[in-house]
């Protein structure tokens, strides 16, 4: 069940030492999407579908479609998951992701805003958390050994 | 939120979260799981997790019991913050790698006249 008031928004910003044009390719090209997010089917034009088998957590399948594409500047798409055990119930079309790219020094500031999220999660999501924590553990260990 | 991410950034604290996820467990039993770590250091980890709102403590006499705070990890915002942070770090690494690999990097923008 989706909880009442699906209106939470999170925002993350990171600085990337690459041109907006380079980062844009990682947002619209399936081979490059697969390098950081998951195996992707993508039709990068307004109303075009986006489907990603996510690497993280309980590996849900993300389904959405593009709302807005301003090459090298901003991209927006709807975000939802096919029902997945351990993943929060976010049906396709219920939340929205906005990514903006702003040239900054010799790199780019990337801002990701995810809105329309439920305020609380169902208990079963704890299992998803266990996966997520395990994965973070593996990543931390890899870093440690590198 | 940063507090949550900082709290779970440490492998020992993540291991503690896994321990207290399904049941309440005493400070002594938690410490016993980490023989290589001093008691004060384990206490410090527990304090950080309590402060971040991820676990809660119950005192019984001079003993302390810890368990996952029901709405700490299940808060949606925290879930999605964590969900995005790992892939965005991979995006940064992959884009920087491509940018600095001569074969695939685009031309440097020319200076405007």
Image: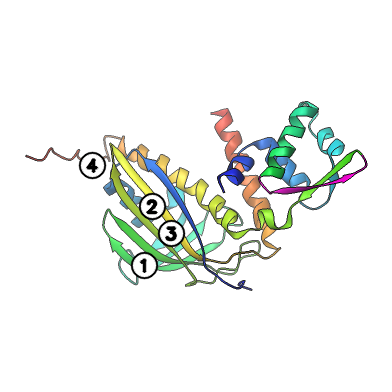
Identify residue for label 4.
B106
* Pointers 2 and 4 within a single chain: no
Closest to the camera, between mark 2 and mark 4, is 4
Bounds of the magenta segment:
B52-61
Closest to the camera, between mark 1 and mark 4, is 1
Across and down, in percent, residue A37 comes to: 47, 52
**Vertical relation: A130 (above or below) B108:** below
In the picture, residue A69 is in which quadrant?
Answer: bottom left
Element on which disc 3 rests: strand
Identify residue for label 2.
A31
Q: Chain under label 3?
A: A
Label 3 vs 2, first from the N-terminus? 2
Please give the name of the residue rendered at 66% of the width and 45% of the height, measured from the top-left corner: B52
Alpha-carbon distance for marks 2 and 4? 17 Å
Label 1 vs 2, first from the N-terminus? 2
Across and down, in percent, residue B102 comes to: 27, 34
Please give the name of the residue rendered at 57% of the width and 39% of the height, measured from the top-left corner: A139
């Amino acid at each position: 069940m989706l909880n009442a008031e699906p209106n939470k928004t999170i925002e993350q910003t990171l600085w990337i030492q690459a041109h907006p044009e380079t980062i844009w390719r990682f947002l619209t090209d399936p081979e490059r999407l697969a390098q950081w997010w998951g195996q992707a089917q993508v039709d990068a034009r307004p109303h075009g579908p986006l489907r990603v088998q996510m690497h993280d957590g309980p590996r849900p399948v993300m389904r959405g479609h593009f709302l807005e594409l301003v090459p090298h500047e901003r991209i927006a798409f709807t975000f939802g998951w096919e029902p997945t055990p351990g993943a929060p119930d976010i049906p396709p079309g219920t939340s929205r992701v906005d990514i903006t790219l702003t040239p900054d020094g010799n790199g780019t500031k990337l801002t990701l805003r995810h809105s329309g999220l439920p305020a609380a999660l169902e208990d079963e999501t704890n299992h998803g958390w266990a996966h997520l924590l395990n994965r973070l553990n593996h990543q931390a260990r890899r870093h440690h050994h590198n | 939120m940063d507090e949550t991410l900082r709290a779970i950034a440490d492998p020992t604290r993540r291991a503690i979260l896994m321990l207290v996820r399904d049941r309440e467990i005493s400070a002594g039993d938690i410490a016993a799981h980490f023989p290589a770590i001093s008691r004060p250091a384990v206490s410090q980890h527990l304090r950080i997790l309590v402060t971040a709102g991820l676990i809660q403590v119950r005192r019984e006499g001079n003993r302390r019991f810890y368990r996952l705070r029901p709405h700490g990890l299940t808060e949606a915002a925290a879930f999605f913050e964590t969900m995005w942070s790992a892939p965005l770090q991979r995006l940064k690494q992959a884009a920087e790698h491509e940018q600095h690999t001569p074969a695939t990097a685009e031309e440097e923008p020319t200076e405007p006249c």
